[in-house]
Image: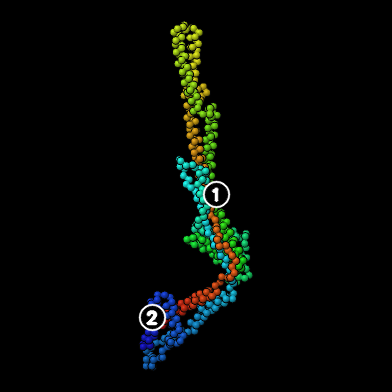
Amino acid sequence: MALMEEDRQIATQELDEIEAPRSRRGSLVGVVAGAARIVARRFSGAVALRPPEPAETAAETRPRKPLPLPNGYLASFFAVFVIPSFLCIVYLAFIASDQYVAEARFAVQTAQFGFASLKLDDDKSSGPAAAVGGLSSGAIPSVSSQDAYVITNYIGSRAIIDDLAGKIDIRAIFQRPEADFWARLKNDPSAEELTDYWKKMVSTYVEATSGIVTVKARAFRPADAKALATAIVEASERLANDVSARARTTIMQQAEEEVRRSEGLVRAALVEMRDFRDKQGFIDPLLAATSTSTLLLEAMTQKITLENNYFVASRAMSPDAPTVVELKSRLDGLDAQIEQLKAQLTGNSPEGRTVAASLVAFEELELKRVFAEKLYSMAQDALERARLRAEQQNIFVSAFVPPDAPQEAKYPERFSLSLLIAAGFFMIWAILAMGAAAIEDHRN
């Protein structure tokens, strides 16, 4: 019983050594340190089997499981830490090929034009002349962060690989004989595999405040790195031009379609008015009504004069007198003319046309024509405004740090990677050893 109590105290002490750093530091480093002390103690033989009790107490004890031998920890140390770390260091030191990095920096800018106000005021001129007169100082470039992110997403996509296929041989660049088996692009890669490899070899970064794009292209030859970075910048410029052209085309198409539609309305109104004039026989019913009214007034004035003369002559002469007969004839002809003019204005004329009815129809056509011409004028003004807005939709890539051929290989970082890999494998082994030690302590 005493031996069991002592074993329990040893196990409790080892667990306290593992848990104490955790409670004191609250990190994995403390746990690993506690496990390392337990393993070291077992390597050194600090924890060993107690000597057997005297014969008189042997019957009271029960068999105990032997503690794990240090050979297991040593084998795991070599299998998990030493051998993998050694292989990685050998690969980085003697096998890994040099990778050269070409860097380029550019800004995606939008050309902003300084235009004066284009409001249609009553006391100011409008239209193209006013718009051109409002041009102040020309194009003012401004940085667009959204356009910069569009460019960077394009650089990391499959689209740029397809665009560069006819300019440079990307597969040949990434399959140079200088490249080692691990870093080289595989033979006959699929489009997805080539895109994933591209994303590993080409990186982009956008500064959120300034919108400056940094592009880094890696290759196994300095000339290849420079050619790859130059091709990326040129493809980005072409994309910016395409985006600008599409934006301008979209804006102008909508405005031009509206102009064409309003122009069609004007043409249709003019055709209807021409057909109306041909059918009615006069150009402007309003002028015709004015002329007819003038003639009617003159005829009525002459009738009043003839009636006076006829009244005087009929009193002084006999009804068969030539003067009275002449005045009577002229008065009857004037009455017929007056009735005809009235019929042309408001009544039924022999030709079936009245000035009043024609005037109503003409006013409707004239209103339609004026409305169509107003729409056409507004559409033309909108087209000019759209043209000015389209000129502002002009983004371009301004490369202020052009790519240059690197002189020294930047990758792989052999020393730092060797340390990081060795530290990683050691952490893995320490965690496994700690778990194994904790399991054995709980079992015993």
Residue 155: horizontal and vertical position, in percent? 55, 61
Query: Which residue sits at x=43%, y=75%?
Result: 28
Residue located farthest toward the front when viewing the structure as drawn: 137
Q: Which mark is residue 249?
A: 1
Query: Which residue sits at x=45%, y=16%?
Result: 304
Residue situated in front as seen by the camera: 70 or 225: 225
Based on the displayed image, in which of its 4 quarters is residue 60 positioned? bottom left
Residue 86 is left or right of residue 36, and the answer is right
Residue type beneath disc 2: Asp
Q: CA distance from mark 1 to mark 2?
A: 75 Å
Determine whether 31 is above or below 176 in the image. Answer: below
Please name which of the two marks, 1 or 2, marks the residue nearer to the observer: 1
User: In this view of the protein, can residue 354 be seen by the observer?
Assistant: no
Residue 324: horizontal and vertical position, in percent? 48, 9
Residue bearing mark 2: 16
Mark positioned earlier in the residue sequence (1 or 2) = 2
Residue type beneath disc 1: Thr
Residue 263: horizontal and vertical position, in percent? 53, 39
